[in-house]
């Protein structure tokens, strides 16, 4: 069976995790702090906080911005449910909007129609690793500055406009106008979950890039406290001689990254550009090459004049088919011992959101794309021979269902 996206676990990773274990420091410590610095260097943003997931990072930032009941947060209907769930956790209302037919990303014109005086945050999702239209989104929040009504929250008063919080779960290493994801808007959040491009088993990072007059270093320090019980000293600081006394300054969360997972991240980051991304691009190019002449297929976009993808997914679409036909094709691909997936089932169509009153049919492009999409395997150890097996399985399945 060809798997969908197993993590790359080799001796280098194992040795570094063992080194972290033997160092005696296994929770948040020197490796996590080094990983944060290296992410900041890589992305060119201002400060980076590593956590145990992207989901935690997104919620922490919504809370930092004082998002609460009565507020609205705009996001694409075409995403993973985590993007929406964190808005619910804060008591606010997710405002789903439709996406572009060509690149699966949030449609800027749809965002603009959805902005009201209750809008606090826009959460674009870099689908499959291709950055959203940040020039346009960053300009949109300035254009609609006078619609924004700041609450008593000091961050809202300081920014005095809608915050752009990018769900960059897929886009570590992607580029836009020559700049790296993580530095493309106010705040971005990466995921290092097991299936993601750069994995630490579980993990995530908040990359802060807030404009003047924000002090991103101060926000970083404040977020360290609010993601570790609200305790004014972390475990490492408490080990300093005589430094045992601590205080709790807020009812904080507990979602810090451990040095064991940071150890994986450090190795993954070191070889990311020259190895991981090269391989992922090779896989995507090979699929594009082998599938380009098939009239039934719609191929994904990885490069535009402004953007370069991180090649997280290979989201193939089959032309003119029903959802039932797509599901039948997937079954036939699995019958050939090839694992595929669908990214994504629309969030407003999920039971929880349906029960809140959302109607998935309100998002036409999302429904159309989702019903015809099949994501092909992309992972570091995928061989050229396996790519051929995947392509043959897809073509055979499509031909047999469309015969
Ligand atoms: C994976 C993913 C997340 C969640 O990441 P975790 O690190 O598992 O919390 C959020 N948004 C999108 C689009 C994702 O694909």
Image (tube, helix red, strand yellow):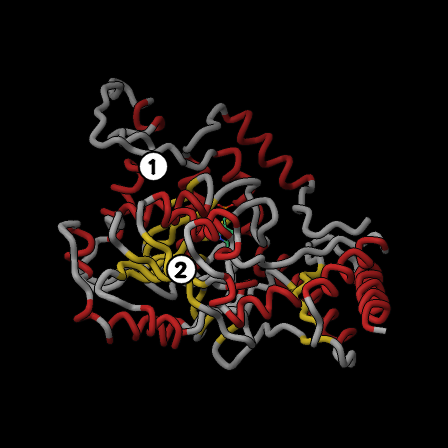
Instruction: Give the image quarter of residue 29.
Output: top left
> Image height check: is 67 above or below 10?
below
Residue located 29% across and 33% down the image: 252
- x and y percentages locating residue 266 in the rendered image: 52, 45
> Image height check: is 288 above or below 87?
below
> What is the spatial separation of the Cα atoms under label 1 and label 2, in whole angstroms?
19 Å
> Which of the pair 225/73 is nearer the observer?
73
* Disc number for residue 198: none
Quarter of the figure with the C terminus:
bottom right
* Disc number for residue 227: 1
> Image height check: is 257 above or below 388?
above
Q: Pointer 2: what residue? A: 166
> Image height check: is 297 above or below 34?
below
Question: Is 366 placed left or right of 215 in the picture?
Answer: right
> Which of the pair 250/321 is nearer the observer?
321
- Local crowd size for mark 2, using a 10 Å CA cut-off: few (<14), some (14–19), many (≥20): many
- x and y percentages locating residue 160 in the rendered image: 18, 62
Question: Is 185 placed left or right of 198 in the picture?
Answer: left
Residue located 45% across and 72% down the image: 176
Which of the marked residues, 1 or 2, is nearer the chain's N terminus? 2
- Residue 42 makes an appearance in the image: no
- x and y percentages locating residue 260 in the rendered image: 52, 33
Q: Secondary structure at mark 2?
A: strand
């Amino acid at each position: 069976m060809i798997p969908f996206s197993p993590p790359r676990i080799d001796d280098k990773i194992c040795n570094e995790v063992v080194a972290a274990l033997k160092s005696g420091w296994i929770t948040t410590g020197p490796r996590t702090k080094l990983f944060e610095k290296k992410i900041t260097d890589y992305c060119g943003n201002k400060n980076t906080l590593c956590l145990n997931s992207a989901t935690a990072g997104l919620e922490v930032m919504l809370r930092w911005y004082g998002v609460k009941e009565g507020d609205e947060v705009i996001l694409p209907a075409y995403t993973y449910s985590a993007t929406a769930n964190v808005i619910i956790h804060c008591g606010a209302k997710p405002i789903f909007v439709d996406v572009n037919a060509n690149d699966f990303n949030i449609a800027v014109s749809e965002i603009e129609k959805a902005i009201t005086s209750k809008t606090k945050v826009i959460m674009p999702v870099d689908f499959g690793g291709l950055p959203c239209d940040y020039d346009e989104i960053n300009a949109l929040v300035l254009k609609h500055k006078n619609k924004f009504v700041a609450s008593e929250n000091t961050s809202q008063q300081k920014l005095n406009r809608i915050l752009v919080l990018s769900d960059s779960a897929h886009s570590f290493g992607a580029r836009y106008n020559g700049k790296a994801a993580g530095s493309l808007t106010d705040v971005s959040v990466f995921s290092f979950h097991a299936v993601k491009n750069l994995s630490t088993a579980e993990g995530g990072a908040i990359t802060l890039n807030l404009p003047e007059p924000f002090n991103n270093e101060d926000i970083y320090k404040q977020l360290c406290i609010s993601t570790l019980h609200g305790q004014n000293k972390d475990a490492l600081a408490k080990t300093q001689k005589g430094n045992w006394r601590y205080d709790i300054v807020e009812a904080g969360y507990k979602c810090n990254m451990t040095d064991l997972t940071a150890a994986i991240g450090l190795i993954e980051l070191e070889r990311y550009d020259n190895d991981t991304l090269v391989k992922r691009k090779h896989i995507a190019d090979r699929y594009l090459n082998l599938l380009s002449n098939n009239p039934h297929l719609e191929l994904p976009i990885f490069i535009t004049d402004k953007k370069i993808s991180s090649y997280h997914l290979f989201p193939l679409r089959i032309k003119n088919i029903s959802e039932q036909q797509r599901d039948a094709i997937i079954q036939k691909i699995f019958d050939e011992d090839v694992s595929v997936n669908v990214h994504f089932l629309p969030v407003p169509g999920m039971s929880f959101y349906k029960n809140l009153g959302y109607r998935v049919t309100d998002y036409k492009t999302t429904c159309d794309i989702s019903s015809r999409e099949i994501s092909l395997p992309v992972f570091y150890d995928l061989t050229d021979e396996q790519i051929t097996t995947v392509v043959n399985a897809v073509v055979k399945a499509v031909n047999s269902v469309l015969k």
